[in-house]
Image (cartoon, rainbow, N blue to C red):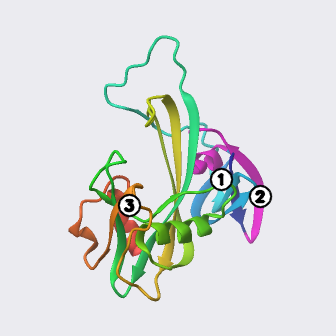
Amino acid sequence: MLYVVAHQDEQSTSEFAVPHGAEPQRVLAQHGWQAGQPIEATRRGDDLVITFRATPALRTDARRVGSTVRRDRDLVVRPGETPMVKQRLAAYAIVQSARGVLATQYSARTAVEARWGLPGGGMDPGEDPRDTVRREVWEETGQDVTVGDLLEVGTSHWIGRGPDGALEDFQAVRLTYRATCPRPIDTVVHDIDGTTADARWLTNPYEVDWADPWRARLPHLLQA
């Protein structure tokens, strides 16, 4: 389960559950809070609790809290077929060092083969998101990193077919951190036959073809 907390004047307010498919920031708005910069994300068992700096909103946002739902192109739903509800919690990092920005290339096991993204991946049950970043960066690139601030919280929601052909109502929750690599080395992909085909230090971050949502968010993350 996903929860969101508003933090104001050095103290946290009430905690709110985030329904499946909803954006945490919209849930805060519905309860009268304007979400600012995320502060931290912590695990409570298998639950994930995300805390934002927040200020009281001038008015409660009464709009629905759900995010925009995308559908697979040419999706055909059989009569009586009900999608399986699934949620993926993941943590990533924009890693910088003297050698540049660290990027990973997606393999044929993904829907964006040959495009590039930031290192990271799904959290194991109960795993702290910072530990997820350290583990995934090492598995995908061979680098040891120091994880810093939580920069962004993003969600995607769509209905489509999973790898096994099952109909899924799928939500991805992405945490993106700042990270540094004090001792960068040549990249090596340890997770063989996984979702990472290659990894590279980029002196020019725009020299590769970035996959969504990284393409749109990269300038902001680099500036942050």
Q: Position of residue 68 (x, y in %)?
A: 46, 37
Q: Secondary structure at mark 2?
A: strand
Picture residue at 29% right of the left edge, 51% below the top: 113
Task: Tell me: residue 43, above or below residue 146.
Answer: above
Q: Which residue is mark 3?
A: 217
Could you tell which of marks 1 and 2 lies nearer the N-terminus? 2
- Between disc 3 and disc 2, the foreground one is 3
**Residues at marks 1 and 2 touching, judged by CB atoms closer than 8 Å:** yes
Q: Earlier in the sequence, mark 3 or mark 1?
A: 1
Q: Which residue is mark 1?
A: 33
Magenta segment boundaries in residue numbering: 9-30
Comparing labels 1 and 2, the label whose residue is closer to the camera: 2
Occupied quadrant, residue 124? bottom right
x%, y% of residue 101?
A: 35, 76
Q: CA distance from mark 3 to mark 2?
A: 29 Å
Q: Quadrant of the C terminus?
A: bottom left
Counting other residues with Cα less than 10 Å from the Cα at mark 3, is it few (<14), some (14-19), or many (20 or more)? Answer: few
